[in-house]
Each structure stands twice: as C-alpha cells, then as structure tokens.
C-alpha cells in the first residue's frame, strides 16, 4: 500500500488556504456547503408545492417523480450559470491585495502538496500491485501534464451537467434499475455533493497553470539541493 498519509500535512494546508479563499470570495468559509443545502432545500420545497413537467430529456423521462424533476432541472440551470458567476467574482477580487496574498498562499500550498505526492509516488517499489502501479501512472500523468488536469476537471464538471440533461433511464420488462431513478432523497444528497464540488473544482481549474509553475520551481530547487549535497558528499569522500 502506498503511504499517501505522508501527504496529509500538505493536504491540511491546502484545505486551510482554500477556506481562506472562500472567506475572501464569499464572506464565509462554509459558503459552498451552505449554498448547496439551500439549493437542494429550494428544489424540494418547489417540488412539494408546484408540479413540474421537466425541461430536459432526463427530467422528462418516464418514471421521474416531481422531486426528481425539480432536483435535476434546478441543478442543471444553476450549474450552467454558477461557474461564470464565480469566475466574475474571482476576477473582481484578484486585484485586491489581501485576496491576492491568500491566492498565492493557496498556490504555494497546492504546489507543495503535489511535490510531496510526487515524492511518495516515486518512492514506490517493485512490489506494488498492478492496480497500484496503474494509480501511480495516472497520478504521474496528472502531475506532469497540465492539459490532462484541464480535461479531467472540465469533463467531470460539465459531464455531470450533461448527464442530468441527456441521460435517460432504460426500462425493461423487469422495470428500471437505473440509479437516476432511485429514491429521490438519495439523489438529493448526490445533487448536494455535486453543487459543493463545483467550488473547489473551479479553484483548481483556474489555478492549474500557477500551481504548475510553482511546482516546477520547487522541483528545480530540490534538484539543485540534491546536486549540492552530492558534490559535498564527494568532496568529503575524497578527504
């Protein structure tokens, strides 16, 4: 098993820096969670009092309850607008010196976390399982290639939205076992999680380039330190 717990300290620093960014952007470190709860409760309240036929193929599918339709359609509409709104707020605040300092702290913390993660992955031995080697390969690719991070995050964010627009359940003679038609409170929980995930994913998306630059600086600094230690060790051995 990989010792990913070795990156726990750096992960805590990332979370703390992220909370400070939320506080600077929205006035509260718990804003993503609170907004997610509000939007889910709003959808449930609307479903309780108003009949909704659905706006998109998913919510118009056979077997959807009124709660499903409201949860899914509100999620789609809000998600299409929430990222541009967060981006505009971010661009407005980025010129603020205090916010800029917190943003730079987040960049440094995330770069440190990635650098530590790289060390953990590269310390792998040959005894690693095939699954672990695959996980390490994906991690190395994420750390090395910016475009892979953009694709992965963008695909997840907008793939979830597209799923609740176009994906429809499949029915057979035994009925539908498709998860999108499961008990609506379960789907309400899933929707709430998806709402809250949009905020850290957005921060990660707009920070990829800056984090990568800081990561390269850390890597170069570590390489110089290792080279210096090697030279000093060789001198000591000669003496």
Image (cartoon, rainbow, N blue to C red):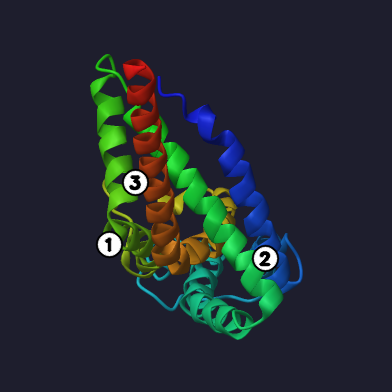
Decide if residue 19 is on the left or right side of residue 58.
Answer: right
Is tag 2's residue or tag 3's residue first in the polypeptide sequence? 2
Compute the Cα span from label 1 to label 2: 26 Å
Task: Give the residue at x 67% y 81%.
Answer: 96
Q: Which is nearer the eye, 90 or 175? A: 90
Identify the residue position indicated by label 1 in the image: 147
Decide if residue 163 is on the left or right side of residue 113.
Answer: left
Quick one: SS at disc 3?
Answer: loop
Could you tell me if residue 190 is visible in this image? Answer: no
Identify the residue position indicated by label 3 in the image: 175
For the C terminus, give its image quadrant. Answer: top left
The picture places residue 122, in percent across and down from the top left corner, at: 33, 31
Quick one: SS at disc 1?
Answer: helix
Decide if residue 195 is on the left or right side of residue 61.
Answer: right
Identify the residue position indicated by label 2 in the image: 22
Compute the Cα span from label 3 to label 1: 42 Å
232 lies above or below 174: above
Q: Which is nearer the eye, 14 or 237? A: 237
Q: Which is nearer the eye, 99 or 60? A: 99
Q: Which mark is residue 138?
A: none
Decide if residue 12 is on the left or right side of residue 54.
Answer: right
Task: Give the residue at x 34% y 37%.
Answer: 227
Q: Are marks 1 and 2 in contact (CB under 8 Å)?
A: no
Could you tell me if residue 170 is visible in this image? Answer: yes
Disc 2 residue crowd, few under 14, some 14–19, many 20+, Cα 10 Å = many
192 lies above or below 10: below
């Amino acid at each position: 098993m990989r010792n990913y717990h070795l990156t726990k300290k750096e992960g805590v620093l990332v979370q703390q820096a992220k909370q400070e960014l939320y506080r600077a952007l929205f006035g509260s470190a718990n804003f993503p969670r609170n907004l997610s709860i509000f939007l889910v409760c709003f959808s449930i309240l609307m479903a309780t009092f108003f009949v909704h036929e659905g706006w998109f193929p998913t919510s118009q599918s056979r077997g959807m309850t009124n709660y499903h339709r409201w949860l899914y359609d509100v999620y789609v509409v809000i998600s299409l607008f929430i990222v541009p709104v967060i981006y505009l707020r971010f661009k407005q605040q980025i010129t603020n010196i205090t916010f800029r300092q917190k943003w730079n702290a987040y960049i440094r913390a995330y770069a440190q976390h990635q650098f530590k993660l790289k060390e953990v992955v590269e310390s792998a031995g040959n005894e690693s399982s095939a699954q672990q080697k695959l996980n390490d390969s994906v991690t190395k690719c994420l750390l090395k290639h910016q475009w892979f991070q953009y694709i992965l995050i963008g695909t997840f964010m907008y793939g979830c939205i597209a799923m609740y627009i176009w994906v429809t359940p499949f029915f057979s003679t035994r009925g539908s076992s498709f998860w999108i038609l499961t008990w609506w409170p379960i789907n309400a929980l899933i929707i709430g999680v998806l709402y809250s995930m949009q905020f850290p994913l957005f921060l990660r998306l707009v920070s990829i380039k800056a984090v990568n630059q800081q990561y390269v600086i850390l890597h170069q600094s570590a390489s110089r330190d290792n080279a210096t230690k090697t030279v000093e060790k060789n001198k000591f051995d000669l003496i």
